[in-house]
Image (tube, rainbow, N blue to C red):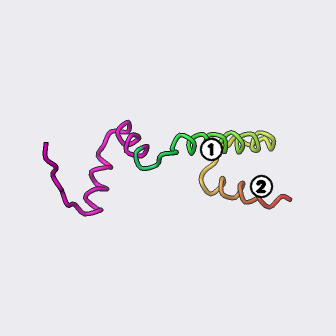
């Protein structure tokens, strides 16, 4: 079996990646980022923590828009 070298631009590659189904995109990410599972776990932990901090304040994180989330995080970071 012989190898074929294909030269494509970064833009072409990005367009091709965007066309992949989600499950295949995930496989591509796992190939590029070996510790993707650990990163997912960290993100999940962060989501749980911010939701808990919101619950303590009587706020539903899921109903906040991006600007409200940013303000809330800023407030929490500067509470000390």
Marks 1 and 2: which is nearer the front? 1
Q: Is residue 42 left or right of residue 34?
A: right
Q: Is residue 38 above or below residue 76?
A: above
Indicate whether residue 26 is drawn in magenta. Answer: yes
Image coords of residue 44 (percent x, y) = 62, 40
Indicate whether residue 32 is drawn in magenta. Answer: no
Which residue appears farthest toward the top when viewing the image?
23
Q: Quadrant of residue 75?
A: bottom right
Of residues 44 and 59, the one nearer the viewer is 44
Give the mark nearer the N terminus: 1 vs 2. Answer: 1
Which residue is identified by label 2?
76
State the mark number for residue 63.
Answer: none
Per the image, label 1 sits on a secondary structure element best described as: helix
Of residues 32 and 79, the one nearer the viewer is 32
Q: Which quadrant: the N terminus?
A: top left
Q: Which residue sits at x=16%, y=49%?
A: 3
State the mark number for residue 42.
Answer: 1
Give the extent of the magenta segment.
Answer: 1-30
């Amino acid at each position: 079996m012989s190898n074929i070298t294909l030269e494509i631009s970064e833009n072409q590659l990005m367009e091709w990646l965007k066309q992949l189904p989600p499950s295949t995109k995930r496989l591509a990410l796992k190939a590029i980022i070996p510790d993707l599972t650990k990163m997912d776990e960290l993100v999940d932990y962060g989501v749980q923590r911010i939701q808990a901090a919101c619950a303590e304040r009587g706020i539903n994180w899921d109903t906040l828009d991006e600007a409200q989330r940013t303000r809330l995080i800023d407030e929490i970071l500067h509470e000390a």
